[in-house]
Image (cartoon, rainbow, N blue to C red):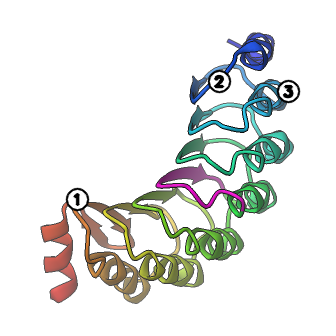
């Protein structure tokens, strides 16, 4: 599938009534910014959407393609579930800033999953996203993955503060593989996750720390 195929899907979305959930998976397809813009236009017609899964990993989407999607998200304050996979896309801090701006309006989110892998996604993104996510009082499930991004200890500290502010978190996944995060910053982040009082499921891959269960994580941070 390419941009023309997504354009057809976007047009069909615009014609549907009372849509509650949308899942679009185009991983590895010949999809670019035009296709995402067409999908976003279709989504803008559904301000009552509760769930959106947009999987665009290994596509040609860049910062400009994220603009329309961010604008569509900002029109959906009732959304409860958002999954956005931009792994392998040419999206940098500039593009993620548009996502952060949209998330400000989405106070009803209970589940949020964001995946990036790009040099150009840096501590700036971690700080901006962290500040917005930390205000989401209803969030119970959070997955943040920055694979081989330009995240350093400063970005890890921002994520740590975010985790510490989420009092109702039950499921957490934080991945910073291939990032320049030292052991001390990694341990502080892992400790913040481990202290979440309602945690039942966890996955942490930061620096030299790797844990895939709550028990394993809490043992690691106690050493």
Q: Could you tell me how far apart the alpha carbons at marks 3 and 2 are, in whole angstroms?
A: 25 Å
Mark 3 closeness class: few <14, some 14–19, many ≥20 residues within 10 Å: some
Rendered view: 171 above or below 155: above
Q: Is residue 106 one of those drawn in magenta?
A: yes
Q: Which residue is mark 2?
A: 18
Q: Could you tell me how far apart the alpha carbons at marks 3 and 1 are, in whole angstroms?
A: 38 Å
Magenta segment: 105-118
Specify the quadrant that holds the C terminus.
bottom left
Q: Nearer the viewer, residue 112 or 30?
A: 112
Q: Which residue is mark 1?
A: 212
- Asked if the residues shown at circle 3 and circle 1 are in contact, with their CB atoms under 8 angstroms apart, the answer is no
Q: Earlier in the sequence, mark 3 or mark 1?
A: 3
Left or right of 124 in this view: 136: left
Left or right of 43 in this view: 148: left
User: Which x, y percent locates residue 188?
Assistant: 38, 86
User: Which x, y percent locates residue 114?
Assistant: 55, 52
- Asked if the residues shown at circle 3 and circle 2 are in contact, with their CB atoms under 8 angstroms apart, the answer is no
Q: Which residue is mark 3?
A: 34
Secondary structure category for the residue under label 1: loop
Mark 1 closeness class: few <14, some 14–19, many ≥20 residues within 10 Å: few
């Amino acid at each position: 599938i390419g941009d023309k195929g997504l354009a057809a899907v976007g047009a069909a979305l615009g014609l549907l009534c009372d849509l509650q959930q949308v899942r679009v998976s185009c991983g590895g397809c010949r999809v670019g910014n035009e296709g995402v813009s067409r999908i976003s236009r279709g989504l803008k017609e559904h301000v009552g959407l509760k769930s959106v899964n947009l999987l665009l990993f290994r596509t040609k989407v860049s910062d400009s393609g994220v603009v329309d999607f961010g604008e569509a998200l900002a029109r959906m304050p009732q959304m409860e579930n958002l999954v956005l996979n931009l792994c392998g896309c040419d999206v940098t801090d500039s593009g993620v800033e548009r996502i952060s701006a949209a998330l400000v309006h989405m106070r009803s989110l209970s589940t949020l999953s964001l995946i990036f892998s790009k040099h150009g996604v840096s501590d700036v993104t971690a700080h901006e996203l962290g500040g917005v996510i930390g205000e989401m009082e209803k969030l119970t499930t959070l997955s943040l993955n920055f694979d081989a991004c330009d995240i350093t200890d400063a970005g890890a500290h921002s994520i740590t503060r975010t985790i510490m502010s989420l009092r109702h978190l039950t499921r957490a996944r934080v991945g910073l593989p291939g990032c320049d995060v030292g052991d001390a910053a990694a341990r502080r982040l892992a400790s913040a996750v481990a202290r979440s009082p309602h945690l039942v499921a966890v996955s942490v891959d930061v620096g030299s720390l790797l844990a895939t269960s709550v028990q394993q994580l809490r043992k690691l941070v106690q050493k």
